[in-house]
Image: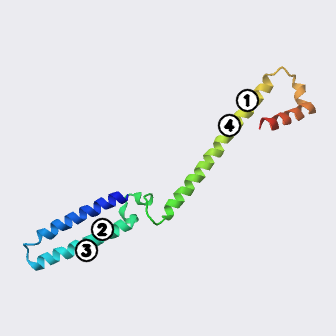
Amino acid sequence: MNRMRDREEQFARQVCHVLDRGTEGLDHGIAERLRAARERALQHQHVLAVNPAIVGAGGTALLTGGEEKHPLRTLLLILAIILGMAVSYYWNGFEQVDQNETIDTELLADDLPPKAYLDPGFQAWLSHYAQSAR
């Protein structure tokens, strides 16, 4: 970023030098008005370069770098983090459902009689199995 700014400043100095040489043959009043107009333009350019919120168009200034933090940039970052957490929670829910589905399928496909599922020992074994699977 600084390299680009240095190039712009160098170009501006070259333009100033050419403009200074170009006013040598003009009337002093005209040359003075041109110099004042150029200084005002350079001061305006300096204001634009210092304030990145003015430079951007279409909302891009909100996401560009600058020395000052923009509140909307912080809000967008927080919203992105919350969205990421929600998607992660939702995705993990799908994985848990898949695991439960696999266990249920294995239990139902087994040769155990249905009365075995009502046995208290089976319930203890199932809760022990669920804890060891974690």
| Towards the viewer: 61 or 90 | 61
* Mark 4 or 2, closer to the camera: 2
Q: Which residue is mark 1?
A: 102
Marks 1 and 2, how far apart in space?
66 Å
The residue drawn where x is 41% and y is 57% is 60
* Mark 1 or 2, closer to the camera: 2
Q: Which residue is mark 3?
A: 40
The residue drawn where x is 62% and y is 49% is 85
Q: Residues within 10 Å of mark 4 (few under 14, many from 20)?
A: few
Q: Earlier in the sequence, mark 3 or mark 4?
A: 3
Q: Which residue is mark 4?
A: 95
Marks 1 and 3, how far apart in space?
74 Å
Based on the displayed image, in which of its 4 quarters is residue 123 positioned? Answer: top right
Q: Amino acid at mark 2?
A: Gln
Q: Residues within 10 Å of mark 2 (few under 14, many from 20)?
A: few
- Pinpoint residue 104: horizontal percent, then vertical percent: 77, 29
In this picture, residue 103 sits left or right of residue 117? left
